[in-house]
Image: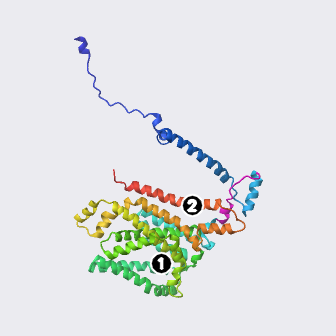
Amino acid sequence: MATADKSIAYVRTEMVGEKPPPPASTGIIGWMRQNLFSDILSTILTLVAIYLIYAILAGVLPWMFRGVWNAGSLNECREILAEEYGEGVGGACWAVIRERFWQLMYGFYPSNQYWRPNMAFILLIAAIAPVLFEKLPRWMIVFTIAVPFVGPWLLWGGTIWVPVVAFAGFVIGVLVNRLVANATSSLLGLIAGVLAAIVWWLLLAGPVVNALASVVPLGLEPVASRNFGGFMLAITLGVTGIALSFPLGIVLALGRQSNLVIVKSLCVGFIEFIRGVPLITLLFVASVLLNYFLPKGTQFDIILRVMIMITLFAAAYMAEVIRGGLAALPKGQYEAADALGLTYWQAQRLIIMPQALKIAIPGIVSTFIGLFKDTTLVSIIGLSDPIGWAKLIQANSEWNGIVWELYGFIAFVFFLFCFSMGRYSMYLERKLQTGH
């Protein structure tokens, strides 16, 4: 009995403290074991990849860091390398980037006017920031509204009244839209607003600009489009194409799914035709053939023609990407919108399109990146983009034969822009992820 009395059951009253995980399963060691050395095949592939990376870097890094930054020609670079490292030792001739940096950036743009594209680029960043990041102050949307009018004026110059009168056309369109929509219907209001803006721009804007310019002659020195070049031209074409092709692609995607036979046929025909024709063909049409279809003596700016073709080309691909997002949306979402009594446009704005665009984010950003890289094709029609300038520099006798330094620098700058777009795409996907 005494022994039985002493055997009292033990009941734990406190939780056992957490123990740290095994050191080999956490940190950099755990990550390497899980991702690089998880099995024999992964270990072999990892070792092969490390060897290839080492072999590449062992040849590239010394060549890069033995570079020459102060020289007037490729031969002078080679002479400096021979004096410092001996005959037969290679090194990068970065002097070409140092000497031709501003031309790679701005092309033939007047050097005393470089502040204008710089200011336009700063305003562009301020304009897209409130669109991309919602935590920024809402008053910054003023830049978003102003840049489409102020930016072209800074780049091309001319009288200040051109962007002012262009903006007035949008104001007139909005006012007419609201007046007609309140009196009749939203569809008639939209049509009336668009027609009012077009009439203002085509018939009244020119005389108004001339009258205001004669009274108050304010403006900047005009710069011809042929003087545009370098990364300034690539960014101008890329940003314009991205900004215009996105809404146009949405309209085409909705039109392709429309029940109206004429609207659907027009959208399908446009999308299939544009997607079936190479971009370089469209650029040649914009550069050469378009003048044959215009009245004699008509001057149509070459960059504007290229912008239109690039926008139409990107919009066709954007429409298919967005259509994929619409097709991936469950049918119940459409039925829920109908059950709530929403109109077609209300359903698209509040329910359908936000979800479809979220699904299509990777494809949309991929199209943007491809469009930005495709701007290099304009060098084939005589515009001096970065690739065009690289060819011009190579044609110079002082730098004839230089290749890797020029194209490496251009690739690096394009990588910065495209990598930034890709990272923002991943950020946006994580932010809008609601699956959890």
The CA span between labels 2 and 1 is: 31 Å
Asked if residue 37 lies left or right of residue 170, the reply is right
Q: Which numbered dot is residue 334?
A: none
Front position in the image: 381 or 31 = 381
Q: Is residue 348 magenta?
A: no
- Secondary structure type for disc 1: helix
Task: Report which quarter residue 107 is drawn in.
Answer: bottom right
Task: Report which quarter residue 80 is drawn in.
Answer: bottom right
Q: Residues within 10 Å of mark 1 (few under 14, many from 20)?
A: many
Query: In the rendered structure, which segment of residues is drawn in magenta?
Result: 86-100
- Secondary structure type for disc 2: helix
**In the rendering, at what x and y percent does residue 199 appear?**
40, 84
**In the rendering, at what x and y percent does residue 143 appear?**
45, 69
Q: Is residue 133 above or below residue 225?
A: above
Q: Which quadrant would the N terminus be assigned to in this image?
A: top left
Please indicate, yes or no, whether residue 118 appears anywhere in the rendered image. Answer: no
| Amino acid type indicated by mark 1 | Pro
| Amino acid type indicated by mark 2 | Val
Q: Residues within 10 Å of mark 2 (few under 14, many from 20)?
A: few
Q: Are marks 2 and 1 in contact (CB under 8 Å)?
A: no
Q: Which residue is mark 1?
A: 163
The residue drawn where x is 43% and y is 62% is: 364
The residue drawn where x is 47% and y is 72% is: 148
Q: Which numbered dot is residue 413?
A: 2
